[in-house]
Amino acid sequence: MPVSFTIEFSVLLVVSLALLAVVTSLLFSPDRYRAGDKLTKPTWVAILGLSVVAHLVLGGSIGIIHLAFTIAALVFLADARPALTSLTRR
């Protein structure tokens, strides 16, 4: 397996992860973010949106910016999303 294929695949995987996180963050109402005691909706959307833009603009380079935004997307998917989905309307 060539190295360039592996790098391209990992970049595609990270961009897909960031896109999933930003789309998911748009699906919840701002009230759920407050009720779940998480960052506000505009804050999450901005962080995750910048993540997608950074991954697409900077391309395949691996750096601290990519790492920080990938961690932000993982934190949203692992912590904020489950808390937001667990809240039900009454």
Image: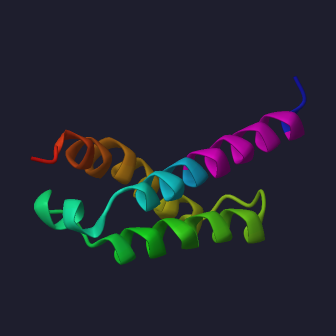
* x and y percentages locating residue 84 in the rendered image: 24, 49
Tell me if residue 48 comes above or below residue 13 in the rendering: below
Residue 13 magenta: yes
Q: In the rendered view, does 37 fall on the left or right side of 9? A: left
Please state which of residues 14 and 6 is positioned toward the viewer in this rendering.
14
Residue 10 magenta: yes
* x and y percentages locating residue 4 in the rendered image: 88, 40
Outermost top residue: 1
Q: Quadrant of the N terminus?
A: top right
Please state which of residues 3 and 52 is positioned toward the viewer in this rendering.
52
Q: Residue at x 12, y 61 (%)?
A: 35
Q: In the rendered view, does 28 fall on the left or right side of 83? A: right
- Asked where in the image residue 6 lies, by quadrant, the reply is top right
* x and y percentages locating residue 52 in the rendered image: 62, 63
Q: Residue at x 36, y 53 (%)?
A: 76
Tell me if residue 69 comes above or below residue 7 in the rendering: below
Please state which of residues 15 and 40 is positioned toward the viewer in this rendering.
40
Tell me how many marks there are: 0
* x and y percentages locating residue 62 in the rendered image: 67, 58
Please state which of residues 57 and 40 is positioned toward the viewer in this rendering.
40
- Asked where in the image residue 58 lies, by quadrant, the reply is bottom right
Q: In the rendered view, does 56 fall on the left or right side of 31? A: right
Dominant SS type (magenta)? helix
Q: In the rendered view, does 12 fall on the left or right side of 70? A: right
Q: Residue at x 36, y 76 (%)?
A: 43
- Asked where in the image residue 49 lies, by quadrant, the reply is bottom right
Q: Which residues are magenta?
A: 4-17
Coloring basis for residues: rainbow
